[in-house]
Image (cartoon, rainbow, N blue to C red):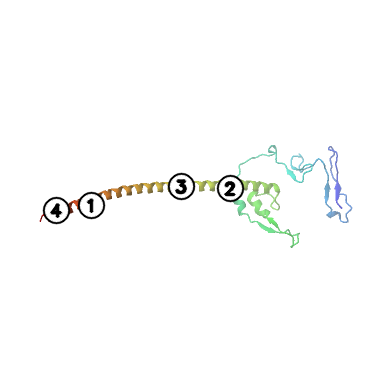
Amino acid sequence: MAADILEDAPPSQTVESFTIITTAASPTIAPLHIRAQGGVIIYDNAGATAGVFLGSNSPVWVTISDRNAKKNFQPVDALGILNKLAAIPIQQWNYKWERDSDVPNIGPMAQDFKGAFYPGRDDKGITTLEFDGVKLVAIQGLNQKLDAELKAKDAKIASLEKKIVDLKSAGRQTGADWETRFQRLEKAVASMTGKNSATLAINNSVKGRE
């Protein structure tokens, strides 16, 4: 049997404590059911500024991320974050309370992750906020890396294309030079052939007279 607490309480009602109501044989394993048609907000500080929100008819928790709730803004080295993330060991594993036959989980160790990105914080767990921030920055870093590589390749291709054009131009110029030289040679040969023919005719004429 499920446990139920505080269903549809008036907005002004403050609950200092609650009791889990269950008829299960072992209350310690009964699930906790909370029903609030307008959603659920859980604050975890006295000023009611930090916490999470479960919207009405929503299956996911929303983390407070309002710009007005933040401070100490600093730029992030996206490529540096990407390189750090790439260096963190990722393994598959089971929690010690799980059966050896259970499907393994996949992920880093909190000590490695916190040491790389959040040194000084509790290194026994990783929050979704911490995970999501690193993943988003790493995606931006990967995009920057790919963009730089593509630009470098485009520049190299453009350089090679220019060299090809230059070589073709040089080849055409060389061909034109050789064509000019060949024409000159042909003329020289023709001239020499003409002279030889004239000399041969004269010689034949002289021999005939003799």
- Amino acid type at circle 3 is Glu
First reached walking from the N terminus: tag 2 or tag 1: 2
- Amino acid type at circle 1 is Thr
The residue depicted at 64 percent of the width and 49 percent of the height is 117
Give how far across and how far down residue 189 sits, in percent.
Answer: 25, 51
**Residue identifier under label 3:** 161
Q: Please say if the residues under marks 4 and 2 sit with CB atoms less than 8 Å apart.
A: no
**Residue identifier under label 4:** 205
First reached walking from the N terminus: tag 3 or tag 2: 2
Is residue 188 found left or right of 24 in the rendered image?
left
Q: CA distance from mark 3 to mark 4?
A: 65 Å
Mark 1 Cα-neighbour bin, 10 Å: few <14, some 14–19, many ≥20? few
**Residue identifier under label 1:** 193
Closest to the camera, between mark 2 and mark 1, is: 1
**Residue identifier under label 2:** 79
Q: CA distance from mark 4 to mark 2?
A: 95 Å
Residue 83 is labelled as: none
- Amino acid type at circle 2 is Leu
> Circle 4 — which element?
helix
Give how far across and how far down residue 194 sits, in percent.
Answer: 22, 50
The residue depicted at 64 percent of the width and 52 percent of the height is 115
Closest to the camera, between mark 3 and mark 4, is: 4
- Amino acid type at circle 4 is Ser
Q: CA distance from mark 2 to mark 1?
A: 77 Å
